[in-house]
Image: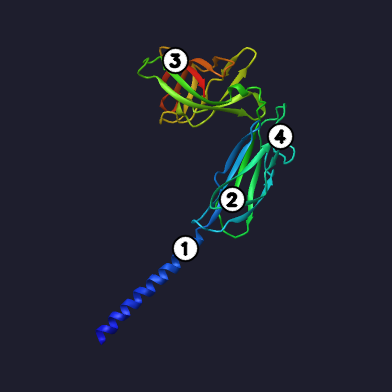
């Protein structure tokens, strides 16, 4: 009888344990329901428009939630004004499990006003699901009337080495973007694989690009600051005052010769001198 009672107690304990685990599992799944933005920033082309993306992360079958959005221009230097610069599809959005897109429709015009920004925030959801850390996002309306629009984008750069042609050639991916307040300048990010942008001045009449000497492209080669100069093709030296001047084409392509990369922390060691060809994607 004693053995029977012990065995029965064990069976009941296991059943209760499974029941408790099952109940806890359901509660845990419910707690996983979370709402937020897919990214902390969205770029919206002025001409085409695009969408911001929200999500409800939860198990299949979780009830939808009604999300309320709020837009703000506080802290934005060049704010995008709702109704003047864009409209938003809706500020009351039903989120099903997965992602939901909300269209941002820019007001396209023929005036260059620069990129404009605003912040959109999730202020509530009807089911009181958890809010993700990413409950706000910055939206940028990308102005397509920029005078240098033809040269804004992503470039595949072939840097032909003078130090050892063929063996030391490099391939860079460089992104160009506007410089606020300077419509004749663009930032070039990714030169030599560096993590800091340098500034280039464009002259669409003369069809030239000019890069002032001594700019830091960042840690391009893993040896600290990499400085850009005009240099000698035999790697014998560089000029601290001579700017780099290249050619730009109407199709967006560019070319800049004598592009010299100098390692600042290694006694201004010349890494290499390149003849660069820029092809826009």
Residue 7 lies in quadrant? bottom left
Which residue is at a point 32% across and 80% down the rendered structure image? 9
- Residues under labels 3 and 2: Cα distance? 52 Å
User: Which circle marks residue 107 in the picture?
Assistant: 4
User: Mark 1 and 4 residues: CB-CB less than 8 Å, in contact?
Assistant: no
Residue that label 1 marks? 28
Residue that label 3 marks? 237
Which residue is at a point 44% across and 17% down the rendered structure image? 274
N-terminal label among 1 and 3? 1
- Residues under labels 4 and 3: Cα distance? 51 Å
Pick out the residue farthest to the front: 61
- For disc 4, the neighbor class at 10 Å (few under 14, some 14 to 19, many from 20) is some
- Residues under labels 2 and 1: Cα distance? 22 Å
The N terminus, quarter of image: bottom left
Q: Tell whether 237 sits left or right of 251.
A: left
User: Mark 4 and 3 residues: CB-CB less than 8 Å, in contact?
Assistant: no
- Residues under labels 2 and 4: Cα distance? 26 Å
């Amino acid at each position: 009888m004693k053995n029977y009672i012990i065995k029965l107690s064990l069976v009941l304990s296991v059943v209760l344990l499974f029941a408790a685990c099952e109940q806890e599992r359901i509660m845990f799944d419910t707690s996983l329901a979370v709402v937020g933005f897919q990214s902390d920033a969205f770029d919206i082309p002025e001409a085409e428009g695009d969408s911001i993306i929200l999500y409800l992360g939860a198990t299949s079958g979780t009830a939808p939630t009604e999300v309320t959005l709020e837009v703000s221009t506080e802290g934005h230097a060049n704010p995008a004004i709702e109704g003047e610069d864009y409209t938003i599809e809706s500020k009351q959005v039903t989120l099903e499990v997965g992602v939901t897109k909300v269209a941002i429709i820019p007001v396209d015009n023929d005036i260059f006003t620069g990129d404009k920004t605003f912040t959109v925030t999730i202020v509530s959801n009807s089911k009181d699901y958890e809010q993700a850390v990413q409950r706000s996002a910055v939206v940028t309306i990308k102005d397509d009337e920029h005078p240098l629009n033809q040269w804004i984008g992503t470039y595949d750069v072939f840097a032909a080495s003078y130090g050892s042609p063929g063996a030391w050639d490099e391939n860079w991916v460089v992104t160009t973007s506007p410089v606020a307040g300077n419509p004749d300048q663009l930032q070039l990010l990714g030169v030599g694989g560096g993590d800091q942008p340098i500034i280039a001045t464009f002259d669409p009449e003369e069809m030239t690009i000019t890069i002032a000497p001594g700019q830091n492209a960042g840690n391009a080669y893993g040896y600290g600051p990499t400085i850009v100069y005009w240099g000698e093709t035999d790697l014998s030296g560089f000029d601290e005052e001579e700017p780099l001047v290249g050619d730009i084409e109407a199709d967006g392509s560019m070319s800049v010769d004598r592009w010299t990369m100098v390692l600042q922390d290694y006694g201004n060691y010349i890494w290499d001198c390149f003849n660069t060809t820029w092809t826009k994607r």
